[in-house]
Image (cartoon, rainbow, N blue to C red):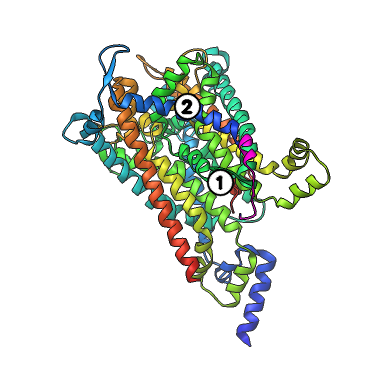
Amino acid sequence: MDKRMTEQRLSAASTVALPRNAVSAGTTDRPFAVNWRAFGLSLYLLALVLPIYWLVNMSFKSNEEINSTMTLFPHHPILTNYIHIFTDPAWYMGYVHSITYVVINVVISVVVALPAAYAFSRYRFLGDKHLFFWLLTNLMAPPAVYALPFFNLYTAVGLFDTPWAVALAHCLFNVPLAVWILEGFISGVPREIDETAQIDGYSFPHFFIKIFLPLIANGVGVAAFFCFMFSWVEMLLASTLTSVNAKPIAAVMTRTVSAAGMDWGMLAAAGVLTMIPGAIVIWFVRNHIAKGFALGRV
Amino acid sequence: MNNKVLNNRAWFFVLPVLLIVLFSALLPLMTVINYSVQDTIGPNAFFWNGAGWFRDVLDPTTPIGANFAGALKRNLVFSAIILVIEVPLGIAISLCMPRKGWKVGPTLVVVALPLLIPYNVVGTIWQVFARNDIGLFGYAINALGIDYNYSLGPTSAWITVIIMDVWHWTSLVVLLCFAGLKAIPDAFYQAARIDGASRWSIFVNIELPKLRRVLVIAILLRFMASFMIYTEPFVLTGGGPGNATTFISIDLVNMALGQLLLGQSAALSLIYELIILAICWIFYTAVTHFEQREWTRE
């Protein structure tokens, strides 16, 4: 009797306070018990943030302060590094170039992948499984393998040193990835919707754009997010395929190494600025990001 | 999905993807194959070399073969260490994550942040953070009386590269597992509570089986990316000290773009890609085989 009452009390308490974490209710009974989960998580988050904080910290320091003292926060904060980046075209154009090829790549990848993902999800056709597998093998292609042949290819077709070269090169892994993610999301939409629309007399393009796309809007957002992510972070191909006119920020950052030594402050400020687009994009997809990382298949 | 309709016109939906992947994957791959079987004497003068380059790369007594054997060994050890650390840590952190309430959003954003940082900036962050003169991490380790300098000591360099990768990529495992855990219905936990299951038995009997699918994706993605790693260690250590952290990609880019050894690097590229494909295929077949056995047993 006693035991049952405790259980009832426990489950009642946990459904009120912590419905999902009820399994750890055993520990909440003891008032002074350490919450190990919160502690472990905080420790991990701190470990993630600390190196980033250090870069932010350095970006507000002068090189004299960086080299002379070890300070946990800037004692003489300056904005010189950031002002320099925002006023010198050689610097800020690096960001413009990077964002240009990333946007082109995201648009191409998602637009091309949508019909293909629909086909893989809804139809059987000759060679469908082989084609899908072949697409996925491109995700396993090391960029280092493709650096030289891409250089030859894009020089031959006259796209070298344009944002198009990088955008198309990144399609190597982003198109298969987008097909894979979208196929997962599309398979989650019941076929009956397609059939009903057909019976109601919708033409296919009309149905696809007006009815189907809104249904998989999350999936499109997640696919776009992943294409953005992998295009934004990839640097080997981006710097191999450009020289002057489309130089990405990664290549510009090497300017901080000079005969006079490293310009740590500038390097830090440039690095901090590369994190901002990512942080903004994550905030928008934060509610779908977990499902997206499981490629829409949970 | 057994209810797919047979429709060969679906090929038209797949056509754009096919064209773009043919252009950005197959054409360069043909170039690589072409180079791998030819030798060159001066510009545009090629002659047939058969399997010569492949023999060189695979024979550890040649200089190129010795470099490759060393880099391959380092890469395999690196990937093994990465998986052993990141997978359990990622599962543990995902179990600590809040699943409801206002904390979910900000936690997800912080966890995902390292994934959105360009690879060269990840290298830069750790290059700065781990230096023993201006970096908090290196400074603190040295203050503890431990001899640590990643640009001089091979052990320090390895530890730094591993910590950097754990910092950079554990979040991917965390997010995948988080998605898997969120998909477990509340009823499972309630049943476990009624049975008086311990935390550990809930993990082993409910959570772990539900995580199997996302863990397969996580292990595949982490293996592939760690086996292709280039930019982060290149920025951090440049492959040194000596060749202590020279992974296959670093070796390859050095040969292909640095020394322009076309034939050798093309042969190495093909062997490199085949190793990745083979390991992924073996792992995937083993998993599906295992799952089928489980199914028939149930």
The quadrant of the image that shows the N terminus of chain B is bottom right
Whole-percent x, y for residue A99 in the image: 58, 24
Residue B10 included in the magenta stretch of the image: yes
On screen, residue B246 versus residue A263, left or right, reads left
Q: Is residue A157 magenta?
A: no
Image-quadrant location for residue A151: top left
Query: Residue B92, percent across and down?
Result: 48, 57
User: Which numbered mark, 2 or 1, is in the foreground of this view?
Assistant: 1
**Residue B139 visible in image:** no
Q: Amino acid at mark 1?
A: Phe
Chain identifier of the residue bearing label 2 in the image: A
Q: Does label 2 or label 1 sit earlier along the sequence?
A: 2
| Extreme residue in the right direction | A200
Observer-nearest of B33 and B203: B33
Tag 2: amino acid: Ala
Are the residues flagged by discs 2 and 1 from a single subunit? Answer: yes
Residue at left offset 75%, top offset 38%: A204
For disc 1, the neighbor class at 10 Å (few under 14, some 14 to 19, many from 20) is: many
Q: Is residue B202 left or right of residue B68?
A: right
Q: CA distance from mark 2 to mark 1?
A: 29 Å
Q: Which residue is mark 2?
A: A268
Residue B120: which numbered mark, if any?
Answer: none
**Residues rendered magenta in the picture:** B2-13
x, y percentage for residue A165?
51, 21
Do residues under tags 2 and 1 come within 8 Å of each other at their CB atoms?
Answer: no
Residue sitting nearer the eye, A292 or B143: A292
Q: Let me know if residue B96 appears in the view.
A: yes
Question: Against B215, is B7 above or below?
Answer: above
User: Residue A135: x percent and y percent?
Assistant: 50, 38
- Residue marked by disc 1: A293
Closer to the camera in the image, B134 or A87: A87
Chain of the residue under the numbered disc 1 shown in the image: A
